[in-house]
Amino acid sequence: MQSPDFSKAGPGALPPAGSGAGPGACLEIDLTAIAENWRLLGRLHAGTVGAAVKANAYGLGADRVAPALFEAGCRHFFVAYVGEALALRPLLPGAMIAVLNGLIPGTESHYATHDLTPTLGSLAEIDAWREAGGGPAILHIDTGMHRLGLEEADVGALAAAPERLAGIGVRYLMTHLVASENPRDPINRAQAERFAAACARLPAAARSIANSSGIFLGTEFASDLARPGAALYGINPRPGRPNPMRQVVRLRARVLSSRNIAAGERVGYNGIWTAMRASRIATVGIGYADGFARVQPGSPAAIFDGRAVPLVGRVSMDLTTFDATDHPGIVPGAWLDMIGLGRSVDDVAEAAGTNGYEVLTRLGARFARNYR
Ligand SMILES: *Cc1c(COP(=O)(O)O)cnc(C)c1O
């Protein structure tokens, strides 16, 4: 992984002005790194590369992330719901904004009015879109995920009655990979084959296959349009191998208080951690209400001055405690790196028993946010 290029200020420095004095934590989002990640994926993928910006751009702020990608040249955006698309429409003039989660009844009129592209995943949705007047759409084909998308029998029904697509401009035939982060999983190839077979039965159209990890699976998974999300935001698309993406997020939390406790004292709710020596405890302003996962005590959950600082006790709603005994620089007003320098989103995910996607999307709207 390339070294993160965040503020030149050393650990413990204050976040940039404008971040607000109140919050106990500060989220820095490197828009330049996001744009660079998008360009890197563009060099690796034979076809066009779009961007998944659903869930508020994986929690990082779609209103800033999507325009940064647009400025870098991205013209294809994917969100989950029409409300997310409506919010982005004025920011992305002329770009395709596709709604992944299907055509929810009652939302049809928004699509035509605001030039949004539905992703149709059932015969009922196809019929509803045609009856609403049709227009551009993506057809989603289920090749193994079994959540959304046309099943094999639906593809057969469409092939037998192509007039059901009358007035629908199929911009892409799309499928979504089940296990693209694991190149050894045979489902990848099976999905590519099922998708090719389904496409062969439908009217010719451009195709869209790969998510982030799919871009790294090889040319068989290249298509007219890739739909990466995670890798744009710095999550490793090749787990277990070096991360080719630039780190995007830096999350710092402020030390609010520090105290000395005697050996044998216990810290935090239910006293699940006991000091084995006289210890200095630093309390920082971040907790699970901020989306900081309740990692296990003893986990090296923060970095200060290049060194890991062990978390002690339970993560509580707005506060977390650290053993600062060996870190004399950790005093009230200092900042600990929770994600960023020396600690990637994937590291945090591993400590919390989840994946980088959940870590990012959980980071609440509560932080001061600084965009670079
Ligand atoms: C979320 C999503 C993506 C992006 O996946 P990443 O793994 O984040 O790159 C692509 N396609 C669909 C259908 C999705 O739901």
Image (spheres, helix red, strand yellow):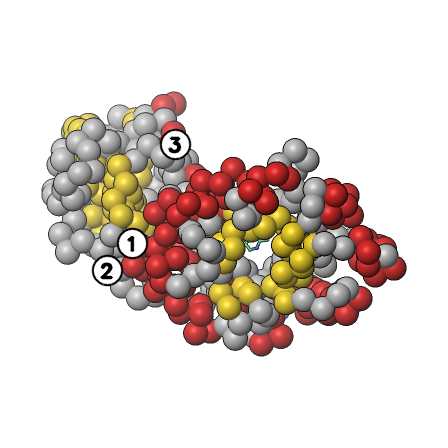
Q: Amino acid at mark 1?
A: Asp
Nearest to N terminus: mark 3 or mark 1: 1
Dot label at residue 5: 2
To which quarter of the image does residue 209 belong?
bottom right
Q: Amino acid at mark 3?
A: Tyr
Dot label at residue 288: 3
Q: Amino acid at mark 2?
A: Asp
> Is the distance from the Cβ of mark 3 to the nearest ligand 1 atom less than 8 Å?
no
Report whether 104 appears left or right of 269: right
Dot 1: element? loop
Residue 155 x, y percent position in the rendering: 80, 58
Residue 121 x, y percent position in the rendering: 70, 49
Residue 217 x, y percent position in the rendering: 56, 70
Nearest to N terminus: mark 3 or mark 2: 2
x 75%, y 65%: residue: 203
Report whether 117 appears left or right of 353: right
**In the displayed image of the protein, which residue is found farthest to the right?**
160
x 53%, y 72%: residue: 47
x 14%, y 33%: residue: 332
Label 2–label 1 contact, CB within 8 A? yes
> Is the distance from the Cβ of mark 1 to the nearest ligand 1 atom less than 8 Å?
no
Instruction: Quote the CA–CA distance across marks 2 and 1.
Output: 9 Å
x 28%, y 41%: residue: 369
Dot 3: element? helix
Label 3–label 2 contact, CB within 8 A? no
Q: Residue under label 1, please give it.
A: 30
Number of numbered discs visible in the structure rendering = 3
Viewer-closest of 162 and 41: 162
Residue 271 x, y percent position in the rendering: 35, 25
Report whether 166 appears left or right of 268: right
Q: Is 262 rendered above or below residue 82?
A: above
- The image quadrant where one finds ligand 1 is bottom right
